[in-house]
Image (cartoon, rainbow, N blue to C red):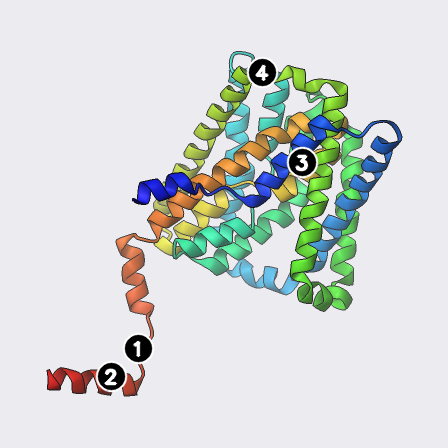
């Protein structure tokens, strides 16, 4: 029965369905002419506002407090910005046999993107791991990624990537870093408002990303770049990404064990160190790759859905670990005195 229930309700993220629907809309009705200019301008403004909100939300005090667990955060950052990119560079040997050069560039960009926050926290909590550590690790990764991802992209992609140039870094500063810094500066005045309207602004976040996706994929359709992706190449990309995810899940779990982290920390490291952020990657790709962003973000979109499905299964299994169940029994609160008295009376009566 469990298998049938799993088959009927796969862990598909509803937002991924919206993203796929947006891709379909861009494929059928891409913006052209004046409409394309309007969509591009709106997308640019949406990206800037998105990173302004990121800056307004980030609590500097919480980030500094989280540095106390520096070994865990250093491990997650190393997995995200060192191990992942090295694996991405190694995948270059698959071109042109399994991957085309544009798809490989997108895969390589995927390995440079920071970790997720929300899903890392959710899966860590589900698996009975160190949730505060997952919160800090995801936040640090996102903050570092705003600075480090464009620099890594310049180093490993350079002029070899279609659409990527040194001018892209200027665009990153103006569209990403400046709004983010402005959000940090204004946080003392607008932080409370942002916190109170977190759900509404979350819808603005997601709507902005959908607009970015529509604009990027619409440009790709108009320019005919989708003729470069065949079903065979797409299957090859999915295979490579499945192997990449499996390797990172194994490295983060067994590597954290070798570094002598306890179980709760290992859970946080696995889920924060093996995942990539779609929310951060899409706007960055739009700025860095411009008209060629459609192929650049395709590997990231596929990897994001894959990591959600796989990590949902792993988190459920981790929650049933004997070590996790034993920890729950140790941390479970004692029943109230009245309840203990009632139990004792019932026992004596029985």
Label 2 belongs to which residue? Answer: 340
Residue at image coords 52%, 30%: 86
Q: Is residue 310 above or below residue 103?
A: below
Question: Does any portion of residue 115 appear in the rendered image?
Answer: no
Identify the element where label 3 is drawn: helix
What label does residue 22 carry, if any?
3
**CA distance separating discs 4 and 3:** 20 Å
Instruction: Choose the circle earlier in sequence order: 3 or 2.
Output: 3
Check contact, mark 4 vs mark 2: CB within 8 A. no
Question: In the image, residue 342 lies at what x, y percent?
Answer: 23, 86
Q: Which of marks 4 and 1 is in front?
A: 4
Label 1 belongs to which residue? Answer: 334
Residue at image coords 54%, 21%: 234
Q: Which residue lies furthest to the top in this view?
A: 97
What label does residue 230 carry, if any?
4
Q: Nearer the viewer, residue 12 or 60?
A: 12
**CA distance separating discs 4 and 1:** 60 Å
Instruction: Choose the circle earlier in sequence order: 4 or 1.
Output: 4
Q: Which of marks 2 and 1 is in front?
A: 2
Disc 1: CA contacts within 10 A as few (<14), some (14-19) or many (>=20):
few
Q: In this view, does 56 lie above or below 45?
A: below
**CA distance separating discs 3 and 1:** 51 Å
Q: Which of marks 4 and 3 is in front?
A: 3
Residue at image coords 59%, 51%: 140
**CA distance separating discs 3 and 2:** 57 Å
């Amino acid at each position: 029965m469990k298998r049938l229930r799993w088959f009927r309700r796969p862990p598909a993220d509803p937002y991924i369905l919206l993203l796929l629907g947006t891709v379909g809309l861009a494929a059928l009705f891409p913006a052209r002419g004046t409409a394309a200019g309007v969509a591009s301008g709106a997308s640019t403004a949406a990206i800037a506002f998105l990173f302004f909100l990121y800056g307004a939300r980030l609590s500097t005090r919480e980030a500094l407090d989280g540095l106390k667990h520096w070994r865990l955060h250093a491990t997650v950052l190393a997995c995200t910005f060192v191990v992942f990119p090295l694996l991405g560079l190694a995948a270059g040997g698959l071109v042109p046999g399994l991957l085309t050069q544009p798809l490989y560039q997108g895969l390589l960009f995927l390995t440079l993107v920071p970790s997720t926050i929300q899903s890392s926290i959710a899966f860590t909590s589900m698996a009975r791991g160190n949730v505060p550590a997952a919160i800090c690790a995801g936040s640090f990764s996102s903050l570092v990624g705003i600075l480090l991802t464009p620099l890594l992209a310049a180093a490993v992609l350079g002029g070899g990537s279609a659409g990527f140039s040194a001018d892209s870094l200027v665009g990153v500063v103006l569209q990403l870093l400046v709004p983010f810094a402005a959000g940090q500066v204004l946080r003392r005045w607008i932080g409370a408002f942002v916190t109170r309207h977190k759900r509404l602004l979350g819808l603005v976040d997601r709507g902005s990303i959908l607009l970015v996706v529509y604009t990027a994929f619409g440009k790709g359709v108009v320019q005919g770049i989708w003729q470069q992706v065949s079903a065979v190449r797409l299957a090859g990309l999915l295979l490579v990404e499945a192997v990449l995810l499996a390797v990172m899940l194994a490295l983060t779990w067994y590597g954290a064990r070798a570094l002598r982290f306890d179980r709760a920390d290992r859970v946080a490291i696995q889920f924060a160190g093996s995942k990539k952020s779609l929310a951060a990657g899409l706007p960055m790709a739009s700025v860095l790759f411009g008209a060629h962003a459609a192929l650049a973000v395709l590997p990231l979109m596929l990897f994001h859905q894959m990591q959600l499905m796989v990590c949902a299964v792993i988190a459920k299994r981790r929650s049933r670990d004997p070590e996790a169940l034993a920890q729950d029994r140790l941390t479970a609160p004692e029943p109230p005195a009245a309840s203990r008295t009632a139990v004792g009376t019932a026992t004596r009566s029985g």
